[in-house]
Image (tube, rainbow, N blue to C red):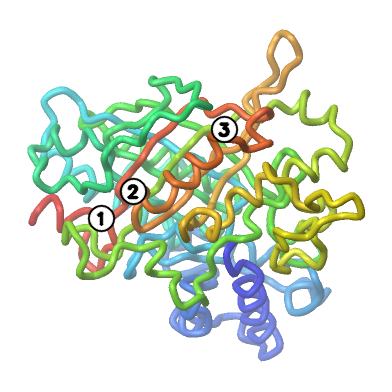
Amino acid sequence: MADQSTKENKKEDAVGDAQENGEQGISRRRLLGTAGATGLALGAAGGATGYAVGSSDDGSGSGSSGSSLALASVGADMAMFHGKHQPGITEGLQASGHLIAFDLAAGAGRTEAAALLRRWSDTARRLMAGEAAAHDDTDVARDAGPSSLTVTFGFGYGFFARTGLEKQRPVALDPLPEFSSDHLDKARSNGDLWVQIGANDALVAFHALRAIQKDAGSAARVRWQMNGFNRSPGATAQPMTARNLMGQMDGTRNPKPSEADFDKRIFVPAAGEPSWMANGSYAVVRRIRMLLDDWEQLSVKQQEDVVGRKKSNGAPLSGGSETTAMDLEKVDANGDLVVPINAHSRITRPDENGGAAILRRPFSFHDGIGADGTPDAGLLFVCWQADPLRGFVPVQRKLDRGDALSRFIRHESSGLFAVPGGAGEGEYVGQRLLEG
């Protein structure tokens, strides 16, 4: 994930400094100051709520040095709810995730939607801080800290007609075009409202999902819901790009927040249109099934030719390391292109798509095994961009015309959602739209 290594290193350094100085009771304010540059912070262990567990050092030193992430810090990591942007966009990949879409109930309009977003925002703020929900908390996450929980909210195309806000619907939210590779299930696509939940603990993630569902009450009903996962923090010797269920590194060329044009590519500018989308982004969500039985019949060399990168370390077939620029003109002794013309990573390069760039932030999924033994597994693809017509659409059109990977995947559901900027202190997500 974008800049994930830097974030993890900063968090480990903060934990190590606290332990070396004997600051067992370090304050939340101190920790926020330490990690604020990344938008992440280590949660106040224990805390005034008495809900999250306290962190501890077992004397092994694993929390302050070494290549693995200390177990105590996984639960203590905390993302901020309030901010310029909503959480769940630039943070590193979490181990467990849920995507859920709602439709407003019959008779529910702008007033009901505003009340719902106010409830949801309050719940998200509490749970992300490691606190209990305001009402009828289930205690599922009582023994855990915030665990990097993020909760992100978006609006679908139909939301605006249901709330009488058609004039505020962004042009960028127009329905995505049809692609030849689509096999979409409409019942599992789109929706008036969309919520993305991610955490580094599965119980913390489920706790948030259940709270969001209960908060919907009579205002909205679930349209579809999907569950995903990624590798757990600390499972590798050092932070590295995640792998998908095909065994390939996924997200090598993600734009990085340190790049000068990152905000321009990913976020709507402060002076953008419509004004309520300032500092927001657009999420394209696709359930992409991987035909793993077919894929796994290929040799490693064949798989690498399909992707255009080495399976072992993500390096381009033209040579170098994972981050080495791909040489699209390099040929082998026979004069053949080293990176095949239809290789996935060649086709998706920004310079091959008029500069189009997306920030990939997916989860893998596995929803069982069919009667024929075929796994229902793949990628819950979530990508972020300032404008999907300049981000996702041109890239997907190019892939549609000859991506070698298309033989081994199937797009089964799709959604596009406008995700407004972050809520300030005392505000709820979407307030500028619903009360503007």
Residue at left offset 44%, top offset 45%? 208
Residue pointed to by mark 3: 288
Q: Quadrant of the C terminus?
A: bottom left
Q: Nearer the viewer, mark 3 or mark 1?
A: 3
Which mark, by number, is residue 277?
Answer: none
Type of the residue with mark 2: Phe
**Considering only vertical position in the picture, is 417 above or below 350?**
above
- Give x and y (percent) for residue 191: 31, 32
- Give x and y (percent) for residue 49: 42, 63
User: Sequence order check: which comes first, mark 3 or mark 2?
Assistant: 2
Residue pointed to by mark 1: 429
Tell which residue pokes out farthest to the top in this image.
371
Residue at left offset 46%, top offset 23%? 184
Mark 2 secondary-structure assignment: strand
User: Sequence order check: which comes first, mark 1 or mark 2?
Assistant: 2
Tell me the CA gap for discs 1 and 2: 7 Å
> Contact (CB < 8 A) between labels 1 and 2?
yes
Type of the residue with mark 3: Ile
Density class for disc 3 (Cα within 10 Å; few <14, some 14-19, many ≥20) is many
Q: Quadrant of residue 211?
A: top left
Q: Quadrant of the N terminus?
A: bottom right
Type of the residue with mark 1: Val
Tell me the CA gap for discs 3 and 1: 29 Å
Residue pointed to by mark 2: 153
